Amino acid sequence: MAMKTEILTLLRESGDYISGQELCNRFGVSRTAVWKVMKQLKEEGYIIEAVQNKGYRMTENPDVFSTSELKSRIRNRWAGRELYFYGETGSTNTDAKRLGEEGASHGTVVAADMQTAGRGRRGRTWESPAGRDIYFTILLRPEFAPDKAAGLTLVMALAVALAVEDKCGVEAGIKWPNDVVVNGKKICGILTEMTVETDYIQHVVTGVGINVNMDSIPEEIRESATSLFLESGKKTARAELLQAVLERFEEYYGKYAADLGMDSMLEEYNAHLVNRNRQVRVLDPKGEWEGVAKGINASGELLVENSAGRTVEVYAGEVSVRGLYGYV
Ligand code: ATP
């Protein structure tokens, strides 16, 4: 770990003064070198107090979204152990796919402060302004068959919903298959893309956009979108939230891969499903129809009871679901 990253970890985890001398000894550098790191950290937005005879102390948890901030937090076994952060990029999914081709390891994360070509499903745009929100993609090399990959979107949605509830103090729901909603509006979208080699998965990328501190919603999506800031009234430190998402994702991915399905998280998932027991309109490219959503099964399919009383299993692939009177 770079010295800056390590100093950041020490300051955050101690919460108290750390003497300059102690840091010098630890890293085998001069006082001036330590002072320079502190200066850099302050320039990046950290609030660091320096008191004679006591040392340095970090007093706040500002929303710094950067390589060092993320690396100083993420302690997972594999999710985010290899990490790339960009101030600006086209699309983190595109970056992660390229890294996948180049042999990057399972769990590699690409995060960005801004995307110029953020994508949703079916070529739609994901609004990705700078300085407020989270855009990241995780590269996965699962050993299971390609038909299980769609479930990764559901596992990620659950990880995001749980992390949001924990860190932001709002109730988060999942709109099957790929959105997380707060108070009926979308705060997160997920896009899973897979590269297949005849009948096995080369790699999968799962990309996530979370509206964190956005304080006004772009006109085009105002009807259906909101942000965690607008719903909770509080700013959230993005790196802390991303850390929480990745921790949960690592855990739940483990369960998914072990069971080859949602078996062990079915109840938790269905408890978060906003469509549950509601009338929905299934937007299947082969034809639209209406029914009542009952929950998902272990394969991640949405169980929808049609007007004839028959339960139909809807596969996540290319389908969207709408409420009859609006987005949820
Ligand atoms: P549906 O909206 O039909 O459920 P979806 O969930 O598959 O579709 P995606 O394709 O994942 O949607 O996301 C793209 C859509 O999300 C865009 O067409 C736009 O309506 C909306 N959108 C774009 N940017 C944002 C954003 N930052 N926050 C919330 N919604 C957004």
Image (cartoon, rainbow, N blue to C red):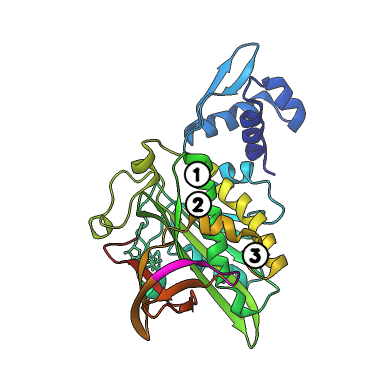
Label 1: state its secondary structure. Answer: helix
Q: Are marks 1 and 2 in contact (CB under 8 Å)?
A: yes
Give the mark nearer the N terminus: 2 vs 3: 2
Number of other residues with Cα within 10 Å of mark 1, as a class: few under 14, some 14 to 19, many 20 or more: some
Identify the residue shown where x is 61% and y is 31%: 12
Q: Which mark is residue 165?
A: 1
> How far across and how far down the image is residue 81, in percent?
67, 53
Label 2: state its secondary structure. Answer: helix
> How far across and how far down the image is residue 23, in percent?
71, 26
Residue behind mark 2: 161
**Residue type at the position of mark 2:** Ala
Gap between marks 2 and 3 measured at Cα:
18 Å
**Residue type at the position of mark 3:** Asp
**Residue type at the position of mark 1:** Glu
Identify the residue shown where x is 34% and y is 54%: 185
Q: Is residue 64 left or right of residue 254?
A: left
> How far across and how far down the image is residue 123, in percent?
37, 74
Residue 297 lies in the magenta-colored region: yes
Magenta segment, which residues? 292-299
Gap between marks 1 and 2 measured at Cα:
6 Å
Decide: is 62 above or below 150.
above
Residue that protrudes farthest toward the front in the picture? 309
Tell us which disc is closer to us: 2 or 3: 3
Q: Is residue 102 left or right of residue 316?
A: right
Q: Are marks 3 and 1 in contact (CB under 8 Å)?
A: no
Is the CB atom of the residue marked by disc 2 within 8 angstroms of ligand 1's nearest atom?
no
The quadrant of the rendered image in which ligand 1 is seen is bottom left
Identify the residue shown where x is 45% and y is 65%: 176
Decide: is 167 above or below 211.
above
Residue behind mark 3: 263
